[in-house]
Image (cartoon, rainbow, N blue to C red):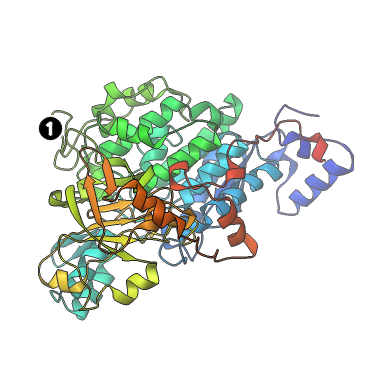
Amino acid sequence: MSNGRRSSRWLEQGGLDGFLHRSWLKSTGVSDESFRGRPVIGICNSWSELVNCNVHLRGLAEAVKRGVLQAGGFPREFPVMSLGESLMKPTTMLYRNLMAMDVEESIRSYPLDGVVLLTGCDKTNPASIMGACSADIPAIVITGGPMLNGHWRGKELGSCSDCWHYHEELRAGRITDGELTEIENSLSRSNGHCMTMGTASTMACMTEALGLTLPGTAAIPAVDSRRVQAAEATGRRIVALVEEDVRPSRILTREAFENAIHALHAISGSTNAIIHLIAYAGRVGIELPLSLFDQLSRSTPWLVNLKPAGDHLMEDFYYAGGLPAVLAQIRDLLHLDELTVTGQTLGDNLDSTPTEIIDPSVIRARSEPLEPRGSLVVLYGNLCPDGAVMKISAADRRLLSHEGRAIVFEDVHDLAARIDDPELDVDADSVMVLRNAGPVGAPGMPEWGHLPIPSKLLRSGVTDLLRISDARMSGTSYGAVVLHVAPESAVGGPLALVQTGDRIRLDAAARTLDLMLDDAELVRRRKSWTPPPRKDTRGYRQLYEEHVLQANDGCDFDFLRGTAPVVTDVTTYL
Ligand code: FES
């Protein structure tokens, strides 16, 4: 009866169960010849018309199916929840773990031998990978690819770095409403995810550096025919992965994560990647302390000149050589023996993939880095005992060693009400603090950390300000922004104790962030602190607030860490 594959327990068995499974499958128009004796490949599709970044994934799924059929598999596409960064409120991060549960349980409950994950917008990639890690059947990712570059009046536009930039120009009175509408119409020219080195692009690169997608595919533009060809190759490859029984747990080792962290620093990727990589590691039982990101930052050069930290966009990155060219430059830092979805090691992949730098203005040679060290740093101090994160490449250097007077905003509503108040007591040396914006407090840790600069400062020429919060920041944002303060204020982290007028000191070189108060004063304030009431008392959102971990632990749910692999013998379920 069984050929050893998991799906055979559904489709090859005798009796009433086998009859029912086959008969209902045949109602979709497939015959025995389509599926008998073939591995069943799930195509886990986060396509949605509500998620512009993923709207082309149905077409990409057709290419994956062609590849699966070419290799002798039986493809079955299925939908999962999708998370669209621009339309979904209050934040897609609130739902990343829910989508991960959808992916995991869909894999677990259906007769799948392997799965292709089709991802695009920011959280659809980590959610899919987290779910596949826990289910732990052979899996491979094909990302949707970045949009083409935006263009406006001779300038290149990147989403969404230039959204923030030109909106600030409008608030400063330097462009008109009509010009902003022109920019709105010029920014998003094609299918695909945001084309700066924001979170979606960063997570696509992380997927490639970890070895979960075919080499050289992270940066291919969404509408380039080579992405469709890569999807077809991905379909062929998953069938082989099933035969080789290469599961995520064999690929995602501590060394593979270290490779990804080196790549993250070399590309100056999104701060959000730190949270997602820690969450992946938690799924496969690996400790990935926040301090490791800082440790590896010190030895990794920053090589990729893309917005928001640099000048170019993902389309340019692809033409310049893409991630393989970057990995080749830092080859000596990488663990080259790590297995990847090609069935070969990372070192073998680099030997068999073009790694030349085509345009050194986009990808720098190791000998001429943009900076000798990485740009994501981890801060500790009495304001963030469990850590905070800062992307120093995107900040005004003046503010990297800075002491200033705190202006505290109780929550995002308080911020919105007062930020442009002409009476707001703020100057270029102030430190803006936002609290109740973390995983529990918001809830969902939205991308509110890029606090807007008050209009009156913008009009006087101020372009950056030190800002601190327990929120995240869009990977496309920039500025002197300290994020992910842990523990967050809503669970009693020291951010809850800051008062307007306190002094705060940042020393990025020393990796410290401190509230300039003695311990006795902090103890006194803590005695009078009461936690804010929880916002949700039913449903998924209650579950979220009760079980979400802090940022330094990846914001996964405590009960979702680890794997619960599906097994080949599923007869107990039949
Ligand atoms: Fe989807 Fe930016 S809105 S990646």
Q: Quadrant of residue 324?
A: top left
Quarter occupied by the C terminus: top right
| Residue that extends furthest to the top in the rendered view of this protein | 337
| Residue at image location 18% in from the left, 59% down from the top | 464
Q: Name the residue under label 1.
A: 368
Q: Where is residue 126 in the image (x, y as percent from the top left)?
A: 47, 46
| Residue that extends furthest to the right in the rendered view of this protein | 15
Q: Quadrant of ligand 1?
A: bottom left
- Identified by mark 1, the residue type is Glu
Q: Where is residue 462 in the image (x, y as percent from the top left)?
A: 13, 64
Q: Position of residue 563 (x, y in %)?
A: 61, 35
In the displayed structure, 309 sits above or below 7; it is below
In the displayed structure, 291 sits above or below 424; it is above
Q: Nearer the viewer, residue 455 or 184?
A: 455
**Relative to residue 85, is residue 332 drawn left or right?**
left
Mark yes or no: residue 236 visible: no
Q: Nearer the viewer, residue 213 or 251?
A: 251
